[in-house]
Image: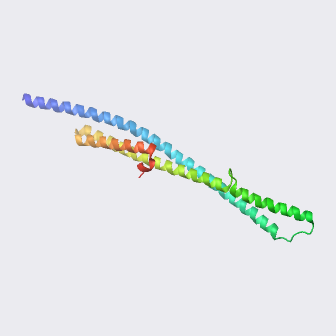
């Protein structure tokens, strides 16, 4: 009878220790889940902002293209008209044609606000958007691993099953790896 009571006491102590460990694991996993979800939300917001900035840049690019085309068309139309006989009018006509051609060149190649500079900015915004999207996916994947770890740790506390507890720790470790990848190498954590 004494051995039965001693065995029961050891089993009760093991149950209490297992429950404490599981509760601690749940608390730690829940904290990591909160951080991961917060980072995923920040990345989602960044995806939206950079997507808007890229769309705005491409709209500006299209407007510059339209203005360039109008300038080139106007220069071509003036060049196709019969040249006036008055030298002053010829000079004024040539100046207007030159201005239209110069405008078209500026719309295309202005280093600060030409089509090339605008397309470079738009591509940069798109690259930032894509990286933020990968970051969001990586943090979302980390959050899923933490959630699974919480469920398994809770189940291990109820059932006193060490394999479930170990698997919950494995899920937590996977979540940590995915979260770290979200900060430093989001492309590897996004799948």
Left or right, 128 with reference to 107: left
Left or right, 187 with reference to 126: left
Left or right, 65 with reference to 50: right
Q: Position of residue 155 (x, y in %)?
A: 27, 41
* Residue drawn at point x = 31 percent, y = 33 percent: 24
Q: Up-down: is 63 above or below 182? A: below
Q: Nearer the viewer, residue 38 or 122?
A: 122
Q: Nearer the viewer, residue 11 or 54?
A: 54
Left or right, 138 with reference to 94: left
Q: Quadrant of the N terminus?
A: top left
Q: Position of residue 169 (x, y in %)?
A: 30, 40
- Can I make out residue 139 in this image? no
Q: Residue furthest right?
A: 86
* Residue drawn at point x = 32 percent, y = 42 percent: 149
Q: Up-down: is 117 above or below 12? A: below
- Can I make out residue 75 in this image? yes
Q: Count up the numbered dots.
A: 0
Q: Position of residue 98 (x, y in %)?
A: 80, 61
* Residue drawn at point x = 15 percent, y = 29 percent: 9
Q: Residue furthest left?
A: 1
* Residue drawn at point x = 35 percent, y = 35 percent: 28
Q: Up-down: is 4 above or below 76? A: above
Q: Position of residue 18 (x, y in %)?
A: 24, 34
Q: Quadrant of residue 73?
A: bottom right
Q: Up-down: is 29 above or below 111? A: above
Q: Quadrant of residue 33?
A: top left
The chosen color scheme is: rainbow
């Amino acid at each position: 009878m004494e051995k039965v009571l001693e065995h029961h006491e050891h089993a009760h102590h093991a149950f209490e220790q297992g429950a404490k460990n599981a509760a601690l694991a749940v608390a730690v996993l829940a904290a990591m889940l909160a951080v991961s979800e917060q980072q995923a939300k920040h990345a989602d917001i960044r995806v939206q902002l950079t997507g808007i900035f890229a769309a705005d840049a491409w709209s500006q690019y299209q407007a510059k293209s339209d203005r360039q085309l109008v300038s080139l068309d106007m220069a071509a139309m003036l060049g196709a008209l019969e040249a006036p006989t008055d030298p002053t009018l010829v000079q004024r006509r040539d100046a207007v044609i030159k201005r239209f051609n110069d405008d078209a060149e500026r719309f295309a190649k202005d280093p600060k606000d030409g089509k090339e500079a605008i397309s470079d900015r738009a591509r940069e915004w798109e690259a930032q958007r894509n990286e933020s999207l990968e970051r969001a996916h990586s943090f979302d994947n980390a959050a899923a691993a933490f959630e699974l770890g919480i469920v398994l740790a809770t189940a291990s506390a109820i059932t006193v099953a060490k394999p479930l507890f170990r698997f919950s720790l494995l899920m937590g470790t996977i979540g940590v790896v995915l979260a770290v990848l979200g900060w430093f190498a989001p492309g590897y954590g996004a799948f």
